[in-house]
Image (cartoon, rainbow, N blue to C red):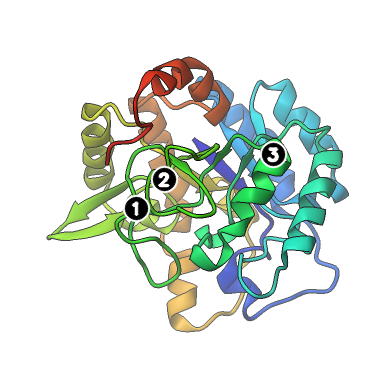
Amino acid sequence: MGIDFEEWFHPELIQKHHKPKSPELYISKGIDKILEWLRKNETFATFFVVGEILESKPELLDKILDNDHEIAFHTMHHTRLDDSISKESFSNELKQFSKLTNKKSKGFRAPSFSLAPSSSWVIDTLIENGYVYDSSVVPVKTRLYGIKNAPTSPYLISSKSINQHDPFGKIIEFPLLATKLLGKHIPAGGGFYLRALPLSIIRSAIISSNKLETPATFYIHSWELVPELMPKVNLPIVDNFITYYNLKKSPQKMTKIIKEFEFTSFERFLSSNLNKFNKSKEFNSS
């Protein structure tokens, strides 16, 4: 379970049209509610946090760690991995985040799942900074993201091979849950797809993944857990639909899922399963 901890102005489709100079932090006020929700449902999660939030509210780190959850890197400003971010600037952001978190972070998720062949150099930077895992790959190509035909279960990733298992890779990739609907592969691991798909389809995807002894990697945005704190921004029709559709129902849907299935954080999962993976000739045989 990953919680992409972002502010209301971080989602890509909002950034495209609305860039406030000194925005007030609304979503961060919901941290106690989110932590209580996790406690009540006996669930541990990894918080993929946008670093500038911790700059403004450093107390969030202790709240997350003191409740036995984990912290992970989601860039400093929720910047896509494309031409707008250089190797040097990404490395500086990573070092800045390490200082903010006392080097507690071992995992990374690219904003908008924007890891692609053109930005695969990010993997080398993660390795250089002692990172262990990544969860940026959606094994389905969509309008906004995705890597077609990537493995659907954890695999070793490298800068030379982000779309298939590399036995010499040093970073473990946790691809997001996907499923098949009407003959087409679609994401099913959270976000818009949590809000848009019937719960029966998501349940079926998780069950199918479990039958293959593959962890169902799931995520939800912080603003989807506290929709009452999410301001409504005027967006074009399609972007508005993707950002806000069924937003008020997302906490209830997610609650039903974590009550039915057992979720945990990434490092907890790794500590329980790494030996099994290490004994395998290949981390992933997909």
Above or below residue 7? Residue 168 is above
Residue 262 left/right relative to 39 = left
Say which label, 3 or 1, has the lower sequence index.
3
Residue 188 drawn above or below residue 273: below
- CB atoms at circles 1 and 2 under 8 Å apart? yes
Q: Position of residue 162 (x, y in %)?
A: 46, 53
Q: Is residue 107 above or below residue 141?
A: above
Three-letter code, disc 1: Ala
Q: Is residue 214 left or right of residue 163?
A: left
- The reply to whether residue 41 is in sight is no
Can you tell which mark lies on residue 196? none
Q: Nearer the viewer, residue 33 or 214?
A: 214
Q: Position of residue 251 (x, y in %)?
A: 47, 43
Q: Residues within 10 Å of mark 2 (few under 14, many from 20)?
A: many
Q: Nearer the viewer, residue 2 or 95?
A: 95
Expressed as whole percent of the image width and height from the top left, the position of residue 111 reads 59, 58
Tag 2–tag 3 contact (CB < 8 Å): no
Side of 258 where 212 appears, left or right: left
Which residue is denoted by mark 2 in the rendering?
Answer: 175
Mark 3: secondary structure: helix
Query: In this image, 264 relative to 253: left or right?
Result: right
Q: Which residue bears the numbered disc 1?
A: 150
Amino acid at circle 3:
Ile
For the C terminus, which image quadrant? top left
The amino acid marked with disc number 2 is Pro
> Nearer the observer, disc 2 or disc 3?
2
